[in-house]
Amino acid sequence: MEKFTTLKGIAAPLKISNIDTDMIIPKLFLKTIKRTGLGVHLFEEMRYLEDGSENPDFVLNREPYRKASILVAGDNFGCGSSREHAPWALADFGIRCVISTSFADIFYGNCFKNSILPVVLPREAVDYLMADAEQGLEIAVDLQEQVVRGSNGRTFAFDIDPFRKHCMLEGLDDIDLTLQRLNRIEEHEAQLKTAQPWVCREAAEA
């Protein structure tokens, strides 16, 4: 997983509350198990017109937001069904951080597994950063210091679980964390073969 330390970039304003995972990536595109190729379908129904052309009114179809790496969103972002394709689509587009007053729990957890930092800030802070985003200004996110910096240098502190922070800084997903304990896993398997050989034999025959 890609490490997340600091991020500075264009922030796209999406001043809509209750953006659900079907709005982020419609169920039509859930057939794939690949994490790539979904960015073009991010916010599909808002981003494109019925004839397939771009909706010129949608924020990600306008400069400078086509290359946005941060999303400043309305309340309760990522609600709805628990599809991991939603953070996949955001990441494939290039979004590395989403800022909101609140997130749906499952989506919030899925973000960390896909190197996207979900930042929860108070209403006043989100409104301030939303105004920066609407002007096309850059925002900086510092995970180590746990602050978001607005265009004029004003900072907003955010909380994050220490373990999740560690994993983001080091670029560790669930598989990486498991592999860090590979020696202990192999030791346990060796002991199991001696203590309970029938278990290993049945597993091999299954």
Image: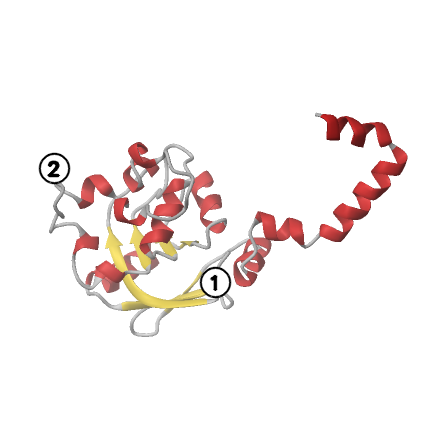
- For numbered disc 1, what is the local secondary structure? loop
Q: Residue furthest front?
A: 205
* Front position in the image: 169 or 179: 179
- Residues tagged 1 and 2 counted as in contact (Cβ below 8 A): no
Q: Is residue 85 left or right of residue 3?
A: left
Can you tell which mark lies on residue 4? Answer: 1
Instruction: Name the residue: 73% across, 26% down.
Output: 205
Q: Residues within 10 Å of mark 1 (few under 14, many from 20)?
A: many
- Vertical order, 198 against 24 (above or below): above
Q: Amino acid at mark 1?
A: Phe
Q: Residue furthest right?
A: 195
* Front position in the image: 177 or 37: 37
Q: Amino acid at mark 2?
A: Glu
Instruction: Name the residue: 16% across, 58% down.
Output: 62
- For numbered disc 2, what is the local secondary structure? loop
Mark 1 or mark 2, which has the lower sequence index?
A: 1
- Vertical order, 51 against 167 (above or below): above
Report x, y in % for residue 147. Answer: 44, 65
* Front position in the image: 21 or 92: 92
Report x, y in % for residue 154. Answer: 35, 71
Q: Is residue 197 left or right of residue 113?
A: right
Q: Which residue is mark 2?
A: 50
Q: Residues within 10 Å of mark 2 (few under 14, many from 20)?
A: few
- Vertical order, 55 against 155 (above or below): above
The C terminus, quarter of image? top right
Instruction: Name the residue: 37% across, 33% down.
Output: 31
Colour treatment of the image: secondary structure
Q: Mark yes or no: residue 43 visible.
A: yes
